[in-house]
Amino acid sequence: MFVIGKDGKIVYQGAIDDKRGTEQTEIASAKNYVKSALDETLGGKPVTESETKPYGCSVKY
């Protein structure tokens, strides 16, 4: 995922959250990196975690 700031620069890149699983209990307790980056950006604050390691399948094209 990428979050782009008002100036057109990438302010976050990486995983959506910190849980790789799909179990409901994992999802409920996951730290959502994208939501945090959006909230901080829209609030005029610097993004505290600007990059995380993405997970999942890779894009091959």
Image (spheres, rainbow, N blue to C red):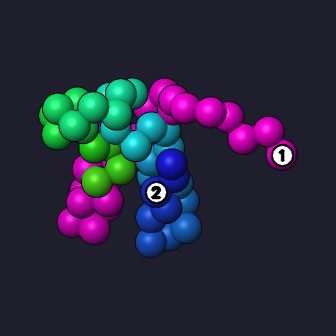
Residue nearest the viewer, comparing 51 with 57: 57
Mark 1 burial class by Cα count in 10 Å: few <14, some 14-19, many 20+: few
Q: Residue at x 26, y 50 (%)?
A: 36
Provide residue 21's location: percent of width, then percent of height.
Answer: 35, 28
Rendered position, 1 above or below 15: below
- Element under label 2? strand
Instruction: Reply yes or no: does residue 54 show up in magenta.
Output: yes
Q: Amino acid at mark 1?
A: Tyr
Q: Which residues are magenta?
A: 36-61
Q: Is residue 31 left or right of residue 14?
A: left
The residue where tag 1 is placed is 61
Instruction: Reply yes or no: does residue 11 show up in magenta.
Output: no
Provide residue 58's location: percent of width, then percent of height.
Answer: 68, 34
Residue 3 marker: 2
Residue nearest the viewer, comparing 29 with 52: 29
Q: Earlier in the sequence, mark 2 or mark 1?
A: 2
